């Protein structure tokens, strides 16, 4: 749900100017919003309300960019792609204000004029365009969803054409593609996972409530909570004591898919900063060994720090080249492969505008290489679990099919057959695990379990 920013909250013009600069950097310099916003808040002094507005505007505009540009295009004869980025992004900010907040018309016009103050020659054009947006915002006619469904999804649900056409080809249903795109534009919940080393869900929920944070159990994962508010969650006593980690429910489920048990040797081949690694350790009750590897030494350093705080003492980190010593030894090799991230657009809306078809093709090739390379670490009778956070057939099903055709000593284990957790709701006919934002209100994950004979 999009937040309604109340006009009675005092927000300085400095905040809107900052939003403008952020959008320029994200959309025209291809920089990442989370890093930019974090850097901004460290350098500049903003109230908590202003920080909330900056965050909500930046992410809201990125989610609804196509819709905003469509409305702007119908308020001006100018072609949006030909506009100066500062002017275009100021229009986007004001259009977002007009549609998704209760800001007054006069306030929006004044904001537009202030943001474009360095373009005095265009001040008249800016004012006329914003006035037209305000006048016609509720009367804009979008493409007919029945007669022109793709054009409607592009304009109203704000996704690039190539992604919509790709999903339509792979999923075969306009209604499902529209449902995914609609879900991608909803603000995701704050989902956390209890640290099994230090607590259980019920006690964590109680402790959060005592600090003023109400929550509800996640529907599918027995380890998760959905917290009702985000503000200052990382300042709570329970977080400082390492009782929980922020982890989407889909990410929790794909970790459970590994079926790890105490005493096993588990290799987390693409561990990153270690969110899933820590959960693996909790599921193993600190018994057995996890070898966590990643190409980034910085991420492995972060993982070690997080493991110490979480009390996860059975995790060892290793460079990728050092994994060869574990050939044919691992009970489970978990490959959380680098991917296009099409399943996490609701959290990273900028990526849908940054991603290209060539990116997906290149990642699919890399994923095949990773699968082939790390499969040799699995012992006979062991499990190879391949996972991504994308909705892309060539990165998911196609990769697994190619791998199995080339490695006859591996076979699929349907996700529904994994013990200790009922994956039947999330297992497709082909045996793969899938979580989707429009169905399970989780990020979009894919998982495949392959047993080495």
Image (tube, rainbow, N blue to C red):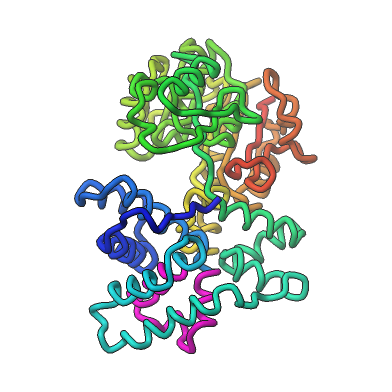
- Count of all numbered marks drawn on residues in the image: 0
Choose between 305 and 83: the one closer to the eye.
Answer: 83
Residue 25 location (% of width, % of height): 32, 64
Q: Which residues are magenta?
A: 67-95
Q: Tell me if residue 325 can be seen.
A: no
Residue extending farthest front: 8
Q: What predominant SS class does the magenta segment belong to? A: helix
Q: Is residue 151 left or right of residue 71?
A: right
Question: Can you say whether 338 is above or below 57 in the image?
Answer: above
Front-lying residue, 350 or 94:
94
Position of the C terminus, as image quadrant, is top right
Q: Is residue 306 positioned above or below 162 on the image?
A: above
Can residue 153 be seen from the camera position used here? Answer: yes
Eyeballing the image, is 331 above or below 322? above
On the image, the x and y values in percent for residue 72 come to: 49, 77
Q: In which quarter of the view is residue 330 placed? A: top right
Relative depth, front residue between 216 and 26 = 216
Residue at x-position 32% and y-position 52% = 50
Q: Residue at x 51, y 23 (%)?
A: 280
> Residue 391 at x, y = what percent?
62, 50
The residue at 57%/64% (across/down) is 159
Answer whether residue 242 is magenta in the image: no
Q: Residue furthest right?
A: 429
Position of residue 434 measured from the top left corner of the image (x, y, whole percent): 67, 40
Please name whichever residue, 53 or 383, is drawn nearer the observer in this view of the structure.
Answer: 53
Write the residue at 76% across / 59% down: 173
């Amino acid at each position: 749900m999009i937040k309604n920013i109340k006009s009675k909250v005092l927000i300085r013009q400095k905040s809107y100017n900052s939003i403008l600069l952020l959008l320029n950097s994200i959309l025209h310099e291809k920089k990442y919003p989370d890093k930019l916003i974090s850097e901004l808040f460290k350098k500049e002094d903003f109230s908590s309300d202003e920080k909330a507005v900056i965050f909500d505007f930046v992410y809201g505009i990125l989610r609804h960019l196509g819709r905003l540009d469509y409305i702007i295009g119908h308020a001006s004869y100018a072609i949006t792609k030909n506009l100066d980025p500062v002017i275009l992004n100021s229009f986007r900010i004001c259009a977002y204000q007009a549609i998704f907040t209760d800001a007054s018309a006069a306030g929006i016009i004044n904001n537009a004029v202030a943001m474009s103050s360095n373009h005095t020659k265009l001040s008249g054009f800016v004012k006329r365009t914003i006035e037209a947006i305000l006048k016609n915002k509720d009367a804009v006619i979008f493409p007919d969803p029945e007669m022109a469904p793709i054009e409607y999804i592009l304009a109203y649900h704000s996704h690039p054409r190539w992604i919509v056409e790709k999903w339509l080809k792979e999923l075969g249903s306009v209604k499902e593609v529209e449902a995914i795109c609609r879900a991608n534009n909803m603000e995701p919940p704050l989902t956390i996972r209890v640290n099994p080393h230090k607590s259980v869900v019920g006690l964590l929920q109680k402790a959060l409530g005592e600090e003023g944070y109400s929550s509800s159990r996640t529907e599918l994962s027995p380890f998760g909570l959905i917290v009702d508010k985000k503000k200052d969650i990382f300042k709570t006593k329970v977080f400082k004591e390492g009782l929980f980690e922020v982890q989407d429910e889909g990410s929790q489920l794909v970790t459970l898919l590994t079926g790890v048990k105490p005493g096993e040797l588990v290799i987390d081949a693409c561990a990153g900063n270690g969110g899933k690694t820590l959960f693996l350790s909790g599921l193993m009750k600190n018994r057995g060994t996890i070898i966590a590897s990643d190409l980034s030494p910085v991420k492995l350093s972060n993982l070690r720090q997080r493991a110490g705080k979480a009390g996860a003492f059975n995790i060892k980190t290793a460079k990728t080249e050092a994994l060869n010593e574990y050939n044919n030894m691992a009970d489970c090799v978990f490959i959380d492969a680098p991917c296009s991230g099409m399943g996490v657009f609701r959290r990273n809306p900028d990526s849908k505008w940054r991603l290209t078809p060539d990116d997906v093709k290149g990642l699919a090739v890399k994923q095949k290489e990773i699968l082939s390379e790390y499969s040799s670490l699995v012992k006979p009778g062991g499990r190879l679990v391949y996972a991504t956070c994308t909705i892309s057939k060539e990165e998911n099903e196609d990769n697994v099919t190619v791998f199995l055709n080339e490695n006859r000593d591996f076979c699929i284990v349907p996700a529904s057959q994994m013990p200790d957790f009922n994956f039947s709701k999330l297992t497709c006919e082909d045996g793969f695990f899938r979580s989707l934002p429009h169905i399970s209100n989780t990020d979009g994950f894919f998982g495949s379990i392959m047993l080495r004979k």
